[in-house]
Amino acid sequence: MKNFSHEEYSLRVKKTLDSMASKNIDTLLVADPANIYYLCGFDAWSFYMPQTMIISSKLDEPICFVRQMDVGGAYIQTYLKDENIIAYPEKLVHMPPRHPYEYLVEVIKDKKLDTGVIAVEMDAHYFTATCYSKLVDGLSNCKLIDSGFLVNWVRFIKSDKEIEYMHQAARNVEVGMQAAIDHINVGTRQCDAAAAIYGGLIKGMEGFGGDYPSIAPMLPTGQGTSAAHLTWSNELFKENEATVIEISGAYKRYHCPMARTVFLGKEDQEKLDVMNKTIEALEEGKAAIKAGVTADSVAQRFWKVLDKYNIKKDSRTGYSIGAGFPPDWGERTLNISKDDPTILETNCTFHMIAVMQMGDWGVEASDAIRVTDKGFEVLSNFSKELVFKN
């Protein structure tokens, strides 16, 4: 069973073609695995090898270009006709200087798509310099340009089915976060807590198992809470130290992140005060959220509270989320930051996150948000208060 209807996939492709036409793009090569999944449903741990979708108004439907080993998965998961799933041979796998994109060039030529403007996802994580050089060497009759996150922006407004999947991801992250809080104790190994978190996220709610999240659980502890993007170690949790938990539930590749903070010891007034100010800033920023306002206006409300308390924060405080594959669950479009003019629209979704780093320690809290006509919805239901475990 496909995750979305044929009609929804067709609408996504049409929106992509319309955006291409507005930018005078004749053919689009899609390399981001989240964008490929969005456009056709292909979901396998195959993105470490070259794979691409070809979108063009000259085609009756898109082409999915994958490794020969992965054709079976594309037959099962996508709505595409078998003839539009094209495999490159195994003899091109890790055989430099030969490369799968040499075969892709031949497919493009065979389909008579090698003229006009061809856009490629130059900043996609798995589109390499070698991929680009093979296109340049093989396609001399066209103009190659950057697609500029074209499909990412098509994904910006979620369908009702996508929102449904994100709600389930929210239930799964609640299970994972409770597992984290339950297992972070003095003398427990950090890796044991990480294992419990993974168990909660993947076991999820009854009847709705979770997918693997696009990012490993981030679990900085002690002085590590003053830094970003640290995971776990084999060390023990210690008394009088905080631990930040940033994780995401995932369901059918749709993500709902959440961050919370635990302190092992008696109530620490300094950390409690900063946590309360962090929550105040989040709530003030959220109060500005509704369809029609800009990301900047939300950020201004958020930073107004930090300015009041003389708290310095340079990083953004939110980013768009939805379908994701490693290494990121971010959608790479909207940022909740000053000067971002993006207009919030109904059913756009983002992770609003407040990381406060105070020298040699820090605290963190976040919410996953859906914009509505009248305001917003917080997807998960879990207290943001600093958790003290004495």
Image (cartoon, rainbow, N blue to C red):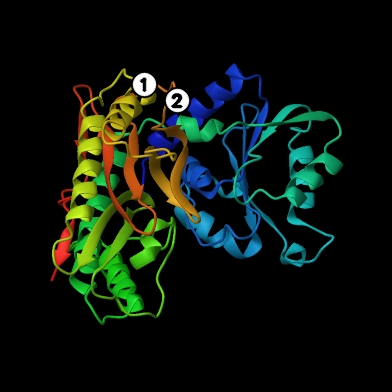
Indicate the position of residue 155 as horizontal and vertical percent values. 44, 34
The C terminus: image quadrant:
bottom left
Q: Residue at x 41, y 75 (%)?
A: 233
340 left or right, relative to 90: left
Indicate the position of residue 218 as horizontal and vertical percent values. 38, 61
Is residue 311 positioned above or below 218 on the image? above
Q: Secondary structure at mark 1?
A: loop
Res. 294 mark:
1
The earlier-in-sequence mark between 1 and 2 is 1
Residue type at mark 2 is Asp
Q: Secondary structure at mark 2?
A: loop
Q: Are marks 1 and 2 in contact (CB under 8 Å)?
A: yes
Nearer the observer, 290 or 144: 290
149 left or right, relative to 353: right
Indicate the position of residue 90 as horizontal and vertical percent values. 71, 66
Indicate the position of residue 18 as horizontal and vertical percent values. 53, 21
Q: Residue at x 80, y 47 (%)?
A: 134
Is residue 41 positioned above or below 332 on the image? below
Residue 376 visible here: yes
Is residue 156 positioned above or below 101 on the image? above
51 left or right, relative to 249: right
- Which residue was labeled with disc 2? 340
How many numbered discs?
2
Few, some or many C-alpha atoms within 10 Å of disc 2 (few <14, some 14-19, many ≥20)?
A: some
Nearer the observer, 282 or 335: 282
Is residue 55 positioned above or below 353 on the image? above
Res. 226 mark:
none
Residue 283 quadrant: top left
Residue type at mark 1 is Thr
Q: Residue at x 49, y 35 (%)?
A: 152
Few, some or many C-alpha atoms within 10 Å of disc 1 (few <14, some 14-19, many ≥20)?
A: many
